[in-house]
Amino acid sequence: MAERTTVRRALAMAGLAPIDAQVLLAHVLARDRAWLVAHATDSLDGADVAAFERLARLRRDGEPVAYLTGRREFWGLDLAVDRSVLIPRPETETLVECALRKLPSESAVRVLDLGTGTGAIACAIARERPRATVVASDRSRTALEVARRNARDLRLDGVQFVEGDWLDAVENAAAFDVIASNPPYVAANDPHLAEGDVSREPVAALVAGSDGLAALRRIIAAAGAHLSPGGWLVVEHGHDQAAAVRGFLAGAGFAELESHRDLAGIPRVAAGRWP
Ligand code: GLN
């Protein structure tokens, strides 16, 4: 008879970082990680062991955990993710915080999320500002399907989705109080693209020209025409791009420039006010 596979043994034999093994086994068993701790000596069904071993192998081969489970938490929201979208990152919560500070909670503000991907930013803002009109754009139709599904599953039915390239996706007359974006900002030759999770994520969500600034340049140049007077543009950028982004914002006519650090202490978000 084959040796009994307990929860503890399956986790220990997976050859993964403990957190990854726990998330994947919890996913297979449709339990949470606390359950695994409380049931460490329970025996597993053969089918569950096989399903877990399959996921563990894919993970060892480099597949991101979020693509294997199809889920990632962002701003306390449980989001669906797949290979057509960037996996939401904690640093993007810094951008959401900054955008929310520009949005009074009791008024019917208008917000645009450019390049929404999973819909993470749009859904987080819609959750925090129920009276806001939130529009989310993406050039990728498959990404928009993921974002629409997330908004629907989270009952954020007011979020509107539009397909298109950056500001081309919205009408000229649409005046927003806040335009937020986490655009691609990695340089095409950045060696970091070959490593870890990013090597499996959509290139279009990561890479923006030879210097990584192509999308930011374009968004910042076009955003003013779509902002209300006194409205804010809030963008995420790379660890070494704060000065460049500030220069683009000043050059495009933005005032009251701000820079915000992420939880790792890295300048990650820039904001500017349209006069
Ligand atoms: N923060 C991501 C990374 O460096 C990049 C995301 C982006 O380009 N918006 O892995």
Image (cartoon, rainbow, N blue to C red):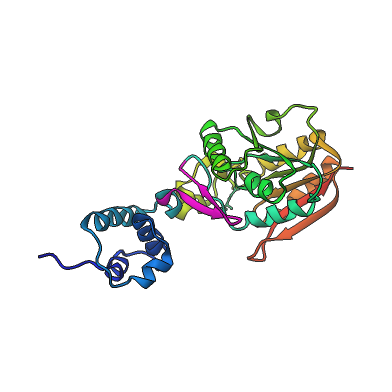
Instruction: Count the marks.
Output: 0
Residue 204 percent location from the top left of the image: 55, 39
Task: Please identify the quarter of the rendering in which residue 4 is found.
Answer: bottom left
The relative height of residue 219 versus residue 87 in the rendered view (above or below) is above
The relative height of residue 80 versus residue 142 in the rendered view (above or below) is below
257 or 172, nearer to the observer: 172
Residue 155 percent location from the top left of the image: 59, 43
Magenta stretch encompasses residue 90? no
Residue drawn at point x = 69 percent, y = 53 percent? 95
Residue 170 percent location from the top left of the image: 71, 29
Q: Image check: 15 left or right of 92?
A: left
The relative height of residue 176 versus residue 194 in the rendered view (above or below) is above
Residue 243 visible in the picture: no
Magenta region, residue range: 69-83
27 or 117, nearer to the observer: 27
| Quadrant (top left/top right/bottom left/bottom right) for the N terminus | bottom left
244 or 135, nearer to the observer: 135
Task: Please identify the quarter of the rendering in which residue 22 is found.
Answer: bottom left
Residue 145 visible in the picture: yes
Residue drawn at point x = 63 percent, y = 54 percent? 92
Q: Image check: 57 left or right of 62?
A: left
Residue 271 percent location from the top left of the image: 78, 50
Residue drawn at point x = 32 percent, y = 57 percent? 56
> Which residue occupies the extreme left position in the image?
1
| Quadrant (top left/top right/bottom left/bottom right) for the C terminus | top right
